[in-house]
Image (cartoon, rainbow, N blue to C red):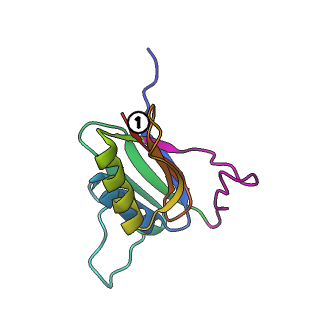
Amino acid sequence: MNPRIRQVVLDTTDARALAEFYRELFGLHYRPGDEPPPEDEPDPKGRDWLVLRNDDGVALAFQQVDELPRSTWPEPGVPQQLHLDTTVPDVAALAAARDRAVALGATLLHDRSDDPDEPLHVLADPMGHPFCVFVG
């Protein structure tokens, strides 16, 4: 029997903020008990470890760290180390996904939306983790 991937874990200096970015971007939901507390209440889980789930895929987890150098990709220096690949059905959806991600705080790193074989955008989440959105 082979192990199965349970979740992908992203290190971050702000676990709650990064989890909220991906929750909004992908329409995910928190693991029971990881939801944000009411406003003005302490958020100890948001300064430690959070998990987001969906109904048909791999979960995303967020691990709080004190320091994290931001990836400098595509420039040398600090590599990606890990990135997420996501897909949308067509070029119109690709543009919409890019616009939504940017509105949520992502940065566009690379625009290859006019590539006839594999249109894509490479973006960085608010903590600098690159992720790709492909047509496929």
Foreground of the two, 75 or 130: 75
- Say if residue 94 shows up in the picture: yes
Q: Is residue 75 part of the magenta span, yes or no?
A: yes
The rendered magenta stretch, by its main secondary structure, is classed as loop
Q: Quadrant of the N terminus?
A: top left
The percent position of residue 107, horizontal first and vertical second, equals 50, 63
Please name the residue shown 49% across and 65% down the image.
Answer: 126
The location of residue 36, given as percent across then percent down, is: 31, 69
Is 14 magenta? The answer is no
Q: Secondary structure at mark 1?
A: loop
The span shown in magenta is 66-85
Farthest residue, direction left: 55
**Residue drawn where x is 45% and y is 31% of the image:** 117
* Residue 132 visible somewhere in the drawing: no
Residue bearing the label numbered 1: 6
Residue furthest to the bottom: 40
Location of the C terminus by quadrant is: top left
Task: Where is residue 86? Give x, y as percent.
Answer: 40, 41
Q: Amino acid at mark 1?
A: Arg
Q: Position of residue 76 (x, y in %)?
A: 75, 51
Few, some or many residues within 10 Å of mark 1 (<14, 14–19, 20+): few
Of residues 87 and 31, the one drawn nearer to the viewer in this rendering: 87
Q: Is residue 101 left or right of residue 74?
A: left
Q: How many marks?
A: 1
102 horizontally vs 26: left or right: right
Frontmost residue, 25 versus 96: 96
Q: Is residue 120 above or below residue 98?
A: above
What residue lies at 59% left-to-right and 62% top-to-bottom? 65
Give me the residue at 46% from left, 18% from top. Answer: 2
